[in-house]
Image (cartoon, rainbow, N blue to C red):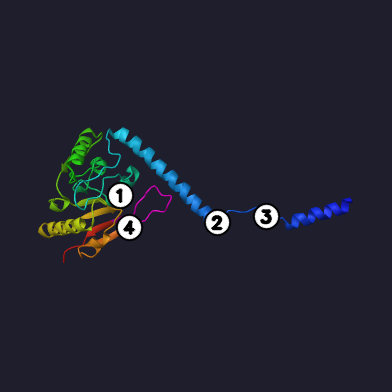
Amino acid sequence: MNVGSHQAQVESDRRHTPPPASIPSSTQTSLGAFLGGKAASLGNRLSDFFTEQRLSIRTAGRQPVSAPDAVPYSTFAYWSIQRVLDRLQLTPDDVFVDLGCGRGRVVCCAALRAARKIIGVDIDPDLCQQARQNAARLRGRRTPVEILNVPAQDCDYSECTVMFMFNPFGRQTVTSVAAAIIDSIQRKPRSVRFGYVNPRHDEVFRDSGAFEQFDRWTPPPWSRLKFDVSFWRSLPRE
């Protein structure tokens, strides 16, 4: 074969060789979201670990709750808790209630802020005892903490002005709790606002006619916020 023929064959092969396979843009986006989500989760875990060391409390882990309609105890990242508390704008006159407080992570975070009182409510006596121990050990506490071992639907909400829920129970209990809060507002008129994390039963508050949603967060896959959060406030009485 002469040189000219060889060069022609090379050019022909080059023209008919398929280009290297590229990664579809949708796959690149999915991969980026996956890696971003993993990085955010790792950031939350590291932040949670060091925050617990700094505050001298132990709230991590999961724990089943032996009660009808209850959801097992689990945690919401400290970074996200602080964002929710910022949005709720606690004041020195507020009484803050965490429904389904578990080991007291949110209660302890709220107690670092200036308020009149911080209350944790949980039906599980062991979780309540752990919450009390964490509140007693908490470094930097600014507000008194009280932990109540009672069913949320039986709690006295007459003092409450700000609340927090991290999907602590099912629709039946949420409905009973909403009714108890509405009753307390009717007996003692005041403004009440709350944040509902992983809000599985938003419709209870929406359909009650007593609350309006004033904000909602829906996190992208790579966010450090891992759950939707809805924010509600009581409607003024006519």
Label 1 or label 3, whichever lies nearer to me, is 3
Look at mark 4 in the image and give the residue it sits on.
Answer: 216
Query: What is the magenta range?
Result: 215-230
Residue 208 is tagged as none
Position of 57 compared to 182: left or right?
Answer: right
Look at mark 1 in the image and give the residue it sits on.
Answer: 84
Label 1 or label 2, whichever lies nearer to me, is 2
Residue type at mark 3? Answer: Pro
Judge by depth and name the residue closer to the eye, 96 or 115: 96
Label 4: few (<14), some (14–19) or many (≥20) C-alpha neighbours in 10 Å: some
Label 4 or label 2, whichever lies nearer to me, is 2
Query: Disc 1 or 2, which lies upstream in sequence?
Result: 2
| Dominant SS in magenta | loop
Look at mark 2 in the image and give the residue it sits on.
Answer: 25
Q: Residue at x 32, y 42 (%)?
A: 78
Mark 1–mark 3 Cα distance, whole angstroms, equals 50 Å
Q: Residue at x 33, y 47 (%)?
A: 80
**Position of residue 45 measured from the top left corner of the image (x, y, whole percent):** 37, 40
Residue 19 is tagged as 3
